[in-house]
Each structure stands twice: as structure tokens, then as C-alpha cells.
Image: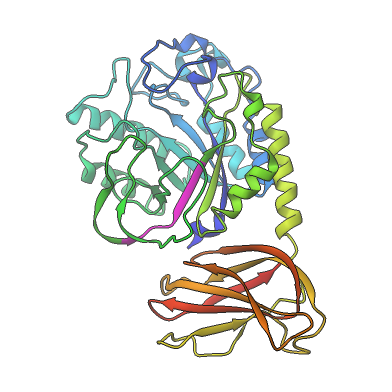
Amino acid sequence: MAFMDWELGLFFHFGIRSFFKGHRDWDNRPMPAEAFNPEQLDCMQWCREARDAGAKYAILVCKHHDGFANWPTKYSDYSVAHTPWRNGKGDVVREFTEACRAYGLNVGLYYSPAQWGGETAFQEGSAYDDYFIGQLTELLTWYGEIDYLWFDGCGSERHSFDRERIVRAIRSLQPDILIFQMWDPDTRWIGNEDGYAPLDNPNVRERLDFSMLASEQERLEAERFLPAECDCMMRDTWFDCADNADRVKSPEELMGMYEMSVGRGSSLLINIGPDSRGLLPDEDVASLRGFGELLRARYGCPNPRFGSVRVESPTSFSIETATFHADREEEPDTDPQLVSRLMVMEDLRDGQHVRAFRVWAHLPGYRSKRVCLYEGRTIGHKAICVFPLMRTAKITVEITEATGPVRIRGIWAF
């Protein structure tokens, strides 16, 4: 429930790849640690821009598939401790976690279970599990409370891990941590890296999309309530290692992604790859700031004419339709306002139950008549209903299909 209220996060892909233009995942091209030297590293800048854009959490890539560790791990020589950066005394993870806390962001750490190259190359057996757990133990004991552990399944599709041992270690070290996607998940991947959720987005799942490379979904031991996260790239690469500034998404495109991710009951995780200076690229910052301004302008101030939720039928759903009106009880059907978006939130404390709904607006002149503005499937944490601009004094949300008691957390018009 708390995770769903985060809604918007920033993802930072940063590491040895940030210094090797043109390299790609699993290309096995050497990337010597000596190249890592972000002389202007400023995690405070990263987190300040995230906070100002409206993000509630941030995630740092601690170890990607190449195996390079952004902290001075004891389990590998391929880390910041063996680079010229700050004479081998630097720790990106520490600076990142401190910056998150300074700007009030929930702290997320990314870790790729799979890796290639070096003395700790991906291999079967308990030795790799030991290495894996050893590094996770460092990450989960050296940096205070970590809110979110983000596992990337890419490359691990057919590998055999000691799952029970790994999960037991994580849960014992950080009992309140949220785990993304793998083994004992609290949240799930939406199934694409483009930032879009489907219109029908139920959170109770028994199968998960494991990775981009997996040929089939992974079956869970039992159904679980798993909120979805939509990750995406600000450019067309995860790391800032190519001349692709012209591919930076515009604020308007990011807004469309927000309305089709957060607006469909998921969270949105936007990746920016800090450059070799250790700073967010100027073009990405400009777009992120523009998106933040657009987000505040569009959703920062609901129309006060539509502010309360009045329940006209029992919240216990049976066969009859449950109807919610979004107009004030005093002076109903007067003072019509221009509206183009409706935000509806379901109260999920007893589960997600809405499976279909409609949004109706009463006409400004013929107020006894109404027109359907929107037909949707699930509501979940939040549904943002976008429709052509019209003038109305009364909006009705009609629940047409549900699996249990319907409770609405709120309705807002914009």
C-alpha cells in the first residue's frame, strides 16, 4: 500500500559502462576499472532533480551485468576501490543513499544476480550463491534502512539459485524491505520497458513476466497481491554512453507515459543515466523539469467544484450497479465547469475489486441527460480517465463489474 503511494521514481544506471561509449549488455567487451573516474560526481544533484520533479523514490544500479560494484565490496576486485576515483576511497552507494535521505526519497538499490567476466563470472553452484549473498549482505548492512531491492532477471532465466537461502538472508537483514520481481516479490514488472501499463491491470497474480529474454512467464507458488511498476528509459539507452541527446523524451511524452502507468494503477520509474562526469546530462534534466512542471500544472490542483465522494448505493457490491457522484451535495447540478480528466482511486485495504466502470457527465443545458465520457476496466490504486474537454456540473462513476465490496478512496476532476 505504501509503495503504491510512491507512484513516481527515478532510476539511475551508472557504473563502468558510463565510461565506455557504444558498449551493450552481454557483449563481453573488456571495460577496465581504471577508466572509472567521475570527477564531479554529485548524487545530491540527482536526488534534488528527482524530488523537484515529484518523485517519491530513487533507485541506483549498484552492480549491473558487467559485475562492476559501485561500492568497495570485499568480494571482488572489480569495484570503485580499484579505480583512480577518489584514490580508491570512494563509495557511490553511500553518497547515493545519503542524498536520497537528504531529499526525502525512499531508497532503492538495483542488483543484477547475473554477471559476466572476471573472477566472479556467472556460474552454477554454491560458490556463486556465496558471492551473491556476500555482496547483498554488504549492501543491506552498510547503508542503513533500504526501502526497495530491485532485482533484474535478465540473464538469470535458466540459472539455478538457492532461492530459499537468498530470500532468508535478505529478509533477516532488512525485514521491512520491498523486493522487486524475483523469488519472494512484493512488486512486479509490468512486462515491457516502455513505461506503459495495460488498461486492465489487476494486482492479484499467479504468473509474472520474468525478463525481456524469458520465453514464458514464471509461475508463483500461490496467488499474490503484487503492485506493478513501469520502468522506462529517458533516452534509448540505460547508460549515458552514446551520442543520443536527440532521443531524450519530451515532457509531453513523459506525461503520456505517466497517464498510462500511474493512471492505470502502476508506478512509473524513469531512468536517467548520469554521464561520465557523475552528473545528470543537461538535456535529461531539462526534460525532467519540464515534466515536473507539467505534472503540477495538470494534476496539482483539482477543480474544487468536484471535491467530495457521495455514495448513493451500499458499498457492498452485489449484482446491482454501485454509483458514486463527484459533485458537491450543496447546490447540485449548478455552476458547470470545464473538465477533461477524472482521477479515481480505489480503497484497496480489503483488496482490489473493481473490474469495469464508466464515467458519465450530465449535460450543461439538458441536465437530466448524461453522456458517457469513459469506459475503463480496473481502477486499483489510481485510474486517470482522459476525455475531450467538456462543461458539466455533475460527474458519475458507475461501477459495472466487481469481485467484492467496492470502496472508493477519492474522486477528483481536472
Residue 385 located left or right of residue 35: right
Residue 397 appearing in the image: yes
Foreground residue, 411 or 174? 411
Q: Residue at x 75, y 63 (%)?
A: 301
Looking at the rendering, the stretch of residues picked out in magenta corresponds to 224-231
Residue 347 appearing in the image: no
Q: In which quarter of the view is residue 29 placed?
A: top left
Q: Magenta stretch: residue 373 in it?
A: no
Q: Residue at x 33, y 25 (%)?
A: 115
- Position of the C terminus, as image quadrant, is bottom right
Question: Which residue is at the far right?
Answer: 335
Name the colour scheme.
rainbow
Residue 92 located left or right of residue 285: left
Residue 158, how many percent across, how many down? 22, 34
Foreground residue, 239 or 69? 239
Q: Residue at x 37, y 32 (%)?
A: 112
Q: Residue at x 55, y 79 (%)?
A: 398
| Number of dots carrying numbers | 0
Residue 299, how many percent across, how many down? 70, 59
